[in-house]
Image (cartoon, rainbow, N blue to C red):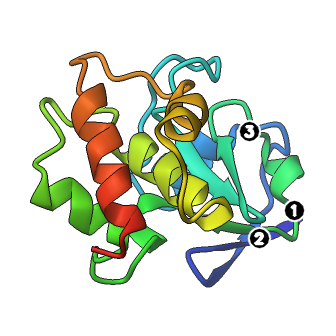
């Protein structure tokens, strides 16, 4: 039995301990905001927070999140008003939107760890999150805006 907390709610998993967290979140918990992109931790679409770290849910096994706190895009802020989410809306960051939950989760962790990042630090920390539409300029601008507290 694997116990974990997802978005503040206690969960128990009695299934395959090697099941990727991504599929538990989407299929078992109905939290579909976390997206499947590449399945190899190369694109960042599946980024969630586990134990205060940004991780790729597609390669993180359920056994690796035992007794951990998991936060998905649905749990980042109860009304969607995390500073990063507000900045994303204000600057109309998404084009297609597919990668945006992973981008937001990575950006939120960046600002938690470094509230006033330089442009270079933003680019470095966000480099593992791919935007197929090329919205990088707007993503970086939104992170800079969120760092001001919006």
Going from N to C along the chain, the mark reached first, 3 or 1, is: 3
Q: CA distance from mark 3 to mark 2?
A: 14 Å
The residue wearing badge 1 is 66
**Residue at image x 87%, y 62%?**
66
**Front disc: 3 or 2:** 2
Judged left or right of residue 88, residue 19 is: right
Label 2 element class: strand
Label 3 element class: loop
Q: Quadrant of residue 95?
A: top left
Say if 78 sits above or below 53 in the image.
below
Label 1 element class: loop
Image position, residue 114 (x, y; %): 63, 59
Disc 3 residue crowd, few under 14, some 14–19, many 20+, Cα 10 Å = some
Q: CA distance from mark 3 to mark 1?
A: 12 Å
Tag 2 and tag 1, C-beta contact below 8 Å: yes
Say if 74 sits above or below 93 in the image.
below
**Residue at image x 69%, y 38%?**
20
Pick the residue in front: 31 or 116. Answer: 116
**Front disc: 3 or 1:** 1
The residue wearing badge 2 is 4
Going from N to C along the chain, the mark reached first, 3 or 2, is: 2
Pick the residue in front: 116 or 50. Answer: 116
Image position, residue 76 (x, y; %): 46, 70
Say if 21 sits above or below 120 in the image.
below
Disc 2 residue crowd, few under 14, some 14–19, many 20+, Cα 10 Å = many
Going from N to C along the chain, the mark reached first, 2 or 1, is: 2
**Residue at image x 51%, y 40%?**
122
- The answer to whether one can see residue 84 in this image is no
Q: Identify the disc placed on residue 19.
A: 3
């Amino acid at each position: 039995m694997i116990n974990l907390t997802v978005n503040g709610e206690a969960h128990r998993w009695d299934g395959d301990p090697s099941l990727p967290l991504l599929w538990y979140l989407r299929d078992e918990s109905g939290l579909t905001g976390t997206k499947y992109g590449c399945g190899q931790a190369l694109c960042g679409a599946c980024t969630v927070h586990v134990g205060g770290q940004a991780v790729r849910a597609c390669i993180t096994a359920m056994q690796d999140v035992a007794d951990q706190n998991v936060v998905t895009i649905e749990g980042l802020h109860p009304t969607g008003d995390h500073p990063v989410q507000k900045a994303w809306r204000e600057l109309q960051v998404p084009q297609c939107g597919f990668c945006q939950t992973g981008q937001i989760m990575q950006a939120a962790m960046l600002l938690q760890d470094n509230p006033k990042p330089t442009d270079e630090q933003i680019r470095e920390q966000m480099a593992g999150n791919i935007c197929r539409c090329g919205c990088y300029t707007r993503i970086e601008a939104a992170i800079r805006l969120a760092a001001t507290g919006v």
